[in-house]
Image (cartoon, rainbow, N blue to C red):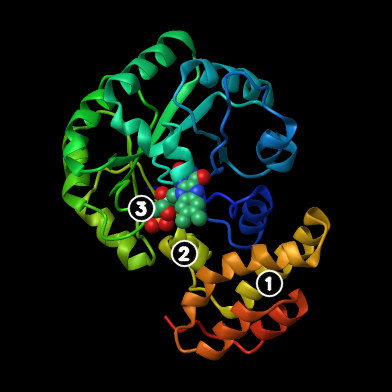
């Protein structure tokens, strides 16, 4: 069973991924957050900076594209081929308004005919391997049956299913019945994604669905970056590791982002998740939230107990 770190836009940058690989490891591949190519605009260097080989040496990186036009897909493929990539993951899950207004991400699920045509064109034209990361529908899970028929028509490398609709955003429970339908019907390898926050939850999904290719973890791995190790039978997370991880990120982000304040924002976003390991440390959680200086934020972390409380 392979374990993947989910793409988390704004958080799992190459800096984050490399630091995670160095300190925690045990993750079989990292999915980079989506890149949005457009038809008319050349992909800027800034856009692909996150996926260049020199910034990602030593990690198995999968690239994700957010588009609903085959022409933009081909331009994107041409741009990343020289970087050594021969596979792309298509984002059919992003629920954000700005993305959905343009018919991309989860909104592409609302247009099954257009999606089918897109996939036909992609498979007819390019030798790039394609995997898909999908939700089970836009407004309702009733849409999933038709979507599965479409996916089953194509030789997808992998189908990653986050069994929520766009309407659910990231809330509510993943629909395990719909996921079971996919397991029963899909011809391609399947990856489960959604709400795996502990090794126990991972084991429970794996025992329900024995033939999965892989499991992808997002917020659970942000909160507990050692979860991949734990799942593989290793030691649970301890505070010192989380602090070492934080210090390594601070050291790398300050020169990259050019200021303490931007670094503070990045770290605050990550610690929104990490603090879940300490449900009894309300005072420290408040200090972290309120910190206006990086030094103040870092000092507050020293109040945390040595052991995680979950
Ligand atoms: C802040 C944030 C950013 C995300 N960015 C992306 C992204 O760039 N591409 C993508 O496919 N999914 C993205 N997702 C969705 C996650 O990859 C994942 O599917 C979702 O969080 C459910 O898995 P989890 O319960 O393990 O977190 C994002 C989610 C969050 C919360």
Q: Is residue 3 visible?
A: no
Instruction: Quote the CA–CA distance across marks 2 and 1.
Output: 16 Å
The residue nearer to you, when weighing 48 against 247, is 48
Crowd tier of the residue under label 2, counting other residues whose Cα lies within 10 Å: few below 14, some 14–19, many 20 or above: many
Q: Residue at x 65, y 37 (%)?
A: 51
Give the residue at mark 2: 227
Give the residue at mark 3: 169
Q: Is residue 43 left or right of residue 285?
A: right
Residue 67 higher or lower than 163, as above or below: above
Q: Can residue 141 be seen in this view?
A: yes
Q: From the Cβ of disc 3, is ligand 1 less than 8 Å away?
A: no
Tag in front: 3 or 1: 3
Q: Is residue 283 left or right of residue 184?
A: right
Residue 300 at x, y percent in the picture:
67, 85
Q: Residue at x 33, y 20 (%)?
A: 114
Q: Residue at x 36, y 35 (%)?
A: 107
First in sequence: mark 3 vs mark 2: 3
Q: Picture quarter containing residue 44? A: top right
* Secondary structure under the numbered disc 3 in the rendered image: loop
* Secondary structure under the numbered disc 1 in the rendered image: helix
Tag in front: 3 or 2: 3
Give the residue at mark 1: 244
First in sequence: mark 3 vs mark 1: 3
* Secondary structure under the numbered disc 2 in the rendered image: helix
Q: Is residue 195 left or right of residue 42?
A: left
Crowd tier of the residue under label 1, counting other residues whose Cα lies within 10 Å: few below 14, some 14–19, many 20 or above: few
Crowd tier of the residue under label 3, counting other residues whose Cα lies within 10 Å: few below 14, some 14–19, many 20 or above: some
Residue 257 higher or lower than 161, as above or below: below
Residue 305 at x, y percent in the picture:
57, 89
Position of the C terminus by quadrant: bottom left
Q: Which residue is drawn at 39% across and 33% down?
A: 132
């Amino acid at each position: 069973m392979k374990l993947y770190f989910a793409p988390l836009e704004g958080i799992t940058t190459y800096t984050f991924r490399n630091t995670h690989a160095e300190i925690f490891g045990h993750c079989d591949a990292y999915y980079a957050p989506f890149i949005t190519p457009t038809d008319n605009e050349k992909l800027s260097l800034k856009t692909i900076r996150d996926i260049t080989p020199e910034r990602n040496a030593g990690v198995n990186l999968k690239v994700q594209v957010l588009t609903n036009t085959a022409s933009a897909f081909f331009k994107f493929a041409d741009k990343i081929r020289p970087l050594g990539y021969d596979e792309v993951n298509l984002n059919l899950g992003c629920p954000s308004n700005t993305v959905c207004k343009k018919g991309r991400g989860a909104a592409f699920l609302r247009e099954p005919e257009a999606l089918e045509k897109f996939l036909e064109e992609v498979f007819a034209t390019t030798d790039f391997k394609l995997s898909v990361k999908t939700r089970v529908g836009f407004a309702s899970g009733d849409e999933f049956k038709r979507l599965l028929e479409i996916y089953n028509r194509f030789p997808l490398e992998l189908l990653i299913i986050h069994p929520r609709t766009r309407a659910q955003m990231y809330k509510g429970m993943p629909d395990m019945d719909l996921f079971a339908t996919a397991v029963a019907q899909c011809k391609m390898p399947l990856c489960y994604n959604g709400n795996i926050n502990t090794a126990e939850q991972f084991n429970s999904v794996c025992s329900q669905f024995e033939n999965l290719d892989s499991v992808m973890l997002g917020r659970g791995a942000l909160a507990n970056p050692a979860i991949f190790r734990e799942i593989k039978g290793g030691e649970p997370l301890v505070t010192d590791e989380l602090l070492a991880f934080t210090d390594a990120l601070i050291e790398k982000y300050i020169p990259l982002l050019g200021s303490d304040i931007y670094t503070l924002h990045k770290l605050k976003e990550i610690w929104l998740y990490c603090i879940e390991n300490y449900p009894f440390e309300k005072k420290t959680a408040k200090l972290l939230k309120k910190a206006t200086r990086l030094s103040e934020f870092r000092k507050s972390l020293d109040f945390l107990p040595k052991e995680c409380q979950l």
